[in-house]
Image (cartoon, rainbow, N blue to C red):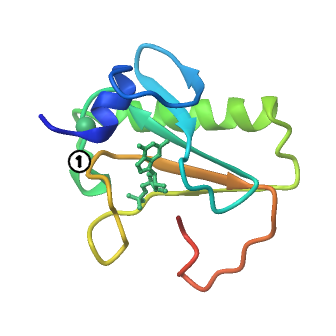
């Protein structure tokens, strides 16, 4: 499958790694919208939030454990935002499930600054 984030998770395309284990890969966004902006993805290809099922949802729970651990290690004590965009109206540009973690400035909620 020709998937950019599958290739990044496999190390076939370089990225700036934040964290890796057997299930997930985290790396800095190439086009950050905040002082801290990284992405957490499952290594397994899941096309987006709409493709999460009873069979594959355990990795989503694991991703949130990883996010909590990284937020603690990075001392994001003033807060952080976790975003996933699904589908064209949401602006999902890469069809591999990914969670944006953004921090380091204040965010409003206009629905239009979400990665
Ligand atoms: P989406 O718009 O699909 O929610 O988010 C995709 C994100 O992936 C964007 O924030 C974009 O900057 C980031 N991105 C796209 N291609 C690459 C890449 O090759 N490397 C990295 N590190 N980030 C990428
Ligand atoms: Zn993929």
Q: Residue at x 54, y 69 (%)?
A: 114
Find numbered disc 1 in the image and state the secondary structure of the residue it sits on: loop
Q: Answer above or below: position of 30 versus 104.
A: above
Q: Answer above or below: position of 15 versus 37.
A: above
Q: Quadrant of the N terminus?
A: top left
Residue 64 left/right relative to 11? right
> Looking at the image, which residue sits at the far left?
1
Looking at mark 1, is its residue's CB closer than 8 Å to ligand 2? yes
Most foreground residue, 53 or 77: 77
Please name the residue that numbered disc 1 is placed on: 47
> Looking at the image, which residue sits at the far front?
14
Q: Answer above or below: position of 22 versus 49.
A: above
| Percent x, y of residue 60 | 42, 38
| Percent x, y of residue 63 | 50, 34
Most foreground residue, 92 or 13: 13
Q: Residue at x 15, y 38 (%)?
A: 2
């Amino acid at each position: 499958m020709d998937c950019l984030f599958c290739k990044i998770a496999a190390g076939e395309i370089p990225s700036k790694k934040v964290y890796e284990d057997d299930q997930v890969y985290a790396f800095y966004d190439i086009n950050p919208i905040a002082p801290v902006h990284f992405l957490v993805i499952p290594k397994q290809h899941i096309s987006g939030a709409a493709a999460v099922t009873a069979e594959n949802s355990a990795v989503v729970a694991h991703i949130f454990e990883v996010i909590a651990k990284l937020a603690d290690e990075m001392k994001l004590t003033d807060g952080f935002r976790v975003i996933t965009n699904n589908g064209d109206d949401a602006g999902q540009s890469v069809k591999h499930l990914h969670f944006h973690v953004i921090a380091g400035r204040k965010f409003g909620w206009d629905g239009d600054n979400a990665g």
